[in-house]
Image (cartoon, grey):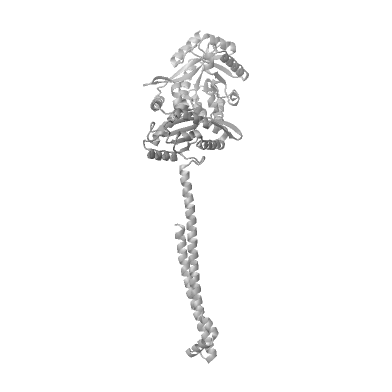
């Protein structure tokens, strides 16, 4: 029930009460006249009768005054009633206007919040879609529209290192930066329509350009845009350099409706990220890659479910003796259409999906099972499994590994998990928690690509790392590149000071082997010893080495 429905019944009740008291006052005044007249009549004639009553009315001035009171009561009652009704109507009108104002404000606020991001106050994805559809409807086929999707690189790391509050502060600063470039002279000259920005979700933004000019150069525009939005921001008085990746699609060349246009801009962005470049303009070959990737993911999922993936092992050797002390496990996928695929081909495609976790679980089960078989045959070597950034923050991983080790009666120190330097930067607090649990269980931990450029050696002190594997590119070129040879020597000496083992990955010839031995490297792997082979072939290698 609204305020009008509540006030109107009260007004009607109030009106009835005033009329009732008006009649009551009238009755009292008439009664007073009658009583006064009867008293005066008795005083004049000694009797109470009509003759005396008339005489009193004719002769007593006080009664004359009293005779006026009924008119006064009636006038007062009606006037008072009308005043109260008028006041009630005024209150009703004021309250109605007040509630209408509040209702309009709430409606405007709700409409704004429905179409804008609560944090940055920029248009959200829903508003952007509506804008694109409206502009396309207006332009028809007589103009071009440009849509750029923008993603802040490594935002998750920023959030984990500085917290959600500071990460949100960065998003607001970045949103302000995007709004400021709308009036940049270059952006004003590339289109004749309205340019707007939107906040799609978390670290993703969009820039909409309407009515692109005929001489619009997408490559030049994306390059300029990247320069404009690449900037530094401050979080807790700390300067943060923010880099972005952009993808662009143009109407009607790359899509004739908003959904397709946004999808193609996102595909261009993802291709740019995978190629490690700051921006890309969409082209139709990308959608073919996207379709192939979806097919590959589907086939890979089925391969995991049906145990159709091939697990191979490459020996890890003690350089001084040539004895095999361990094996790095690798996965291959024999795809019916694309042929035999190494992990490097499909791991980037499934990165960030649940399939990554499923693949790791598959590898752990297969490797621990094979490890138990080798130990039963008298080969007490260790085996390593590569885990992803996603696995490093999976709190369920330690319990899963513990169960597998128990099921196959395998001591944890014979299992090694290899993770990248980048994984140490992904949500450090959770990563440290997971790695410490694994280390406390006895599982060995290794950095698989040390000196690849992501983290300094200080991370070896912050995380329970047992050994490092030197980045392959340094080992492969150390005999031809004196600078790389020096880097390898420094790493070996540094790890010796930190009491960490070193494994050189990528030993391809005897010259490299001898140089590593002189530098003090104890362990290594590479095609010089053996390529990655299946479990049966690896067992033969173990048997051959044990008889040498």
Residue that extends furthest to the bottom in the rendered view of this protein? 45
* Residue 19 x %, y %: 47, 71
* Residue 88 x %, y %: 49, 64
User: How many numbered callouts?
Assistant: 0
Give 483 or 464, whichever is nearer the viewer. 483
Give 151 or 463, whichever is nearer the viewer. 151
| Left/right of residue 485 with respect to residue 283 in the rendered view | right
Q: Quadrant of the N terminus?
A: bottom left
Q: Is residue 360 visible?
A: no
User: In the figure, 205 relative to 533: above or below?
Assistant: below
Give 73 or 360, whichever is nearer the viewer. 73
User: In the figure, 341 relative to 260: above or below?
Assistant: above
Residue that extends furthest to the top in the rendered view of this protein? 548
| Left/right of residue 520 with respect to residue 331 in the rendered view | right
Q: Is residue 56 visible?
A: yes
Residue that extends furthest to the right in the rendered view of this protein? 497
User: In the figure, 310 relative to 170: above or below?
Assistant: above
* Residue 316 x %, y %: 51, 15
User: In the figure, 208 relative to 87: above or below?
Assistant: above
* Residue 259 x %, y %: 40, 35
Residue at (50, 75) in percent of width and height: 73
């Amino acid at each position: 029930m609204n305020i009008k429905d509540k006030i109107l019944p009260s007004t009607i009740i109030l009106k009835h009460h005033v009329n009732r008291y008006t009649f009551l006052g009238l009755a009292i005044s008439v009664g007073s006249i009658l009583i006064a007249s009867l008293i005066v009549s008795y005083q004049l004639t000694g009797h109470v009768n009509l003759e005396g009553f008339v005489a009193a009315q004719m002769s007593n001035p006080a009664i004359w005054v009293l005779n006026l009171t009924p008119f006064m009561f009636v006038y007062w009652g009606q006037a008072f009633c009308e005043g109260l009704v008028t006041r009630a109507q005024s209150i009703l009108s004021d309250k109605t206007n007040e509630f209408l104002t509040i209702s309009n404000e709430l409606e405007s606020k709700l409409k704004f919040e429905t179409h804008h991001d609560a944090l940055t106050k920029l248009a959200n994805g829903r508003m952007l879609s509506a804008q694109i559809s409206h502009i396309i409807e207006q332009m028809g086929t007589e103009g071009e529209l440009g849509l750029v999707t923008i993603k802040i690189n490594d935002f998750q790391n920023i959030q984990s290192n500085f917290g959600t509050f500071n990460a949100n502060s960065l998003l607001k600063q970045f949103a302000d930066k995007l709004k400021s470039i709308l009036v940049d002279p270059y952006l004003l000259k590339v289109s004749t329509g309205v340019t707007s920005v939107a906040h799609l979700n978390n670290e993703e933004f969009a820039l909409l350009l309407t009515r692109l000019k005929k001489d619009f150069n997408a490559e030049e525009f994306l390059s300029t845009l990247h320069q404009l939005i690449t900037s530094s921001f401050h979080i807790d008085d700390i300067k943060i350099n923010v880099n972005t990746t952009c993808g662009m699609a143009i109407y009607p060349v790359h899509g004739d409706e908003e959904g397709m246009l946004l999808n193609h801009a996102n595909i261009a962005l993802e291709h740019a990220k995978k190629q490690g470049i700051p921006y890309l303009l969409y082209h139709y070959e990308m959608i073919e890659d996207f379709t192939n990737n979806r097919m590959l993911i589907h086939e890979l999922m089925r391969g995991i479910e049906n145990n159709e993936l091939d697990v191979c092992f490459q020996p890890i050797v003690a350089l001084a003796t040539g004895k095999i002390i361990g094996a790095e496990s690798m996965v291959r996928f024999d795809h019916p259409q694309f042929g035999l695929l190494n992990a490097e081909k499909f791991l980037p495609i499934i990165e960030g999906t649940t399939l990554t976790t499923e693949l790791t679980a598959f590898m752990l089960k297969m490797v621990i099972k094979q490890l138990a078989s080798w130990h039963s045959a008298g080969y007490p070597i260790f085996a390593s499994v590569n885990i992803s950034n996603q696995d490093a923050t999976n709190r369920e991983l330690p319990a899963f590994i513990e169960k597998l080790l128990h099921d196959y009666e395998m001591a944890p120190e014979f299992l090694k998990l290899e993770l990248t330097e980048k994984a140490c930067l992904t949500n450090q607090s959770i990563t440290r928690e997971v790695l410490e649990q694994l280390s406390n269980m006895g599982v060995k931990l290794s950095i698989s690509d040390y000196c690849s450029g992501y983290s300094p050696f200080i991370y070896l002190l912050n995380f329970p790392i047992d050994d490092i594997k030197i980045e392959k590119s340094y080992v492969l070129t150390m005999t031809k590149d004196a600078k790389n040879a020096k880097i390898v020597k420094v790493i070996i000496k540094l790890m010796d000071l930190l009491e960490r083992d070193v494994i050189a990955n990528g030993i391809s010839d005897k010259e490299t082997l001898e140089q590593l031995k002189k530098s003090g490297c104890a362990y290594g792997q590479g095609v010089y010893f053996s390529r990655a082979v299946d479990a049966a072939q690896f067992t033969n290698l173990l048997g051959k080495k044990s008889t040498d």
